[in-house]
Image (cartoon, helix red, strand yellow):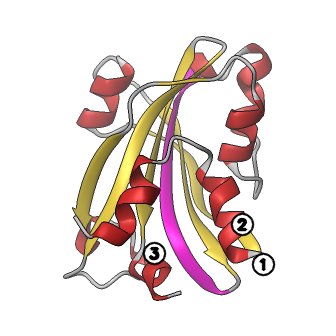
Amino acid sequence: MPANIQAWLFDPASLTTRLRQKCRTGFRVDVLSQTTQKPRLDERKVLGMATGSSALIRQVRLCCGDTCWVYARTVIPFATLKGKQRIYANLGTRPLGAMLFADRTMQRDEVVITSLSGRDLPHAVCTPKDSTVWGRRSVFKVGDKPLLVSEYFLPAFFEE
């Protein structure tokens, strides 16, 4: 794992806050999709979801100006989107991290470090297919209800 990414991967603080500080101006959330889908097997397992269950899946790019730095995928079981947590279904271009870290009921499970091939990312992320993209994922609990956040640092992030 490259040394320049370790501090970002292991930081327990809000990634949104750190990206805003690094970007200074022009930070934005580019929503790629937000749809009802069946989560991948690994996502269902970590969330304790039954086979065949669907969830709200939101995919975004976190960008500084026109440069996209992070691809993020959030899986929210429908059982989580009840009561006060319904707000997570209507984020639009608001960053999820800002809302999670402002929620007093939020708890974060351990951070799991992972990597993907560029070919495993959505086409809209525009990452070379032969690149390795490092990331992390965590289960957050809001009001004791789980959601899974995966964040992958794109090659352009390290060119700044």
Q: Residue at x 24, y 62 (%)?
A: 116
Where does the image place residue 123, in percent across and percent down from the top left? 39, 76
Q: Looking at the picture, does residue 106 appear above or below residue 116?
A: above
Where does the image place residue 29, in percent across and percent down from the top left? 69, 64
Q: Residue at x 66, y 45 (%)?
A: 97
Q: Can the viewer see residue 16 in this picture? A: yes
Q: Identify which amino acid the numbered label 1 is placed on.
A: Gly
* Gap in angstroms between the C-alphas marked 1 and 2: 11 Å
Dots 3 and 1: beta carbons under 8 Å?
Answer: no
Where does the image place residue 33, in percent across and percent down from the top left? 57, 58
Q: Identify which amino acid the numbered label 3 is placed on.
A: Val
Where does the image place residue 86, in percent across and percent down from the top left? 74, 26
Q: Identify which amino acid the numbered label 2 is placed on.
A: Gln
Query: In terms of secondary structure, where does tag 3 sit?
Result: helix
The residue wearing badge 1 is 26
**Magenta region includes residue 74:** yes
* Gap in angstroms between the C-alphas marked 3 and 1: 18 Å
Secondary structure of the magenta portion, mostly?
strand
Q: Residue at x 37, y 65 (%)?
A: 5
Query: In terms of secondary structure, where does tag 2 sit?
Result: helix
Using residue 1 as the reference point, say whether residue 127 is left or right of it: right
Seen from the viewer's position, the closer of residues 91 and 5 is 5
The residue wearing badge 2 is 21
Q: Disc 3 or disc 1, which is closer to the eye?
A: 1
Using residue 159 as the reference point, say whether residue 135 is left or right of it: left
Q: Residues within 10 Å of mark 3 (few under 14, many from 20)?
A: some
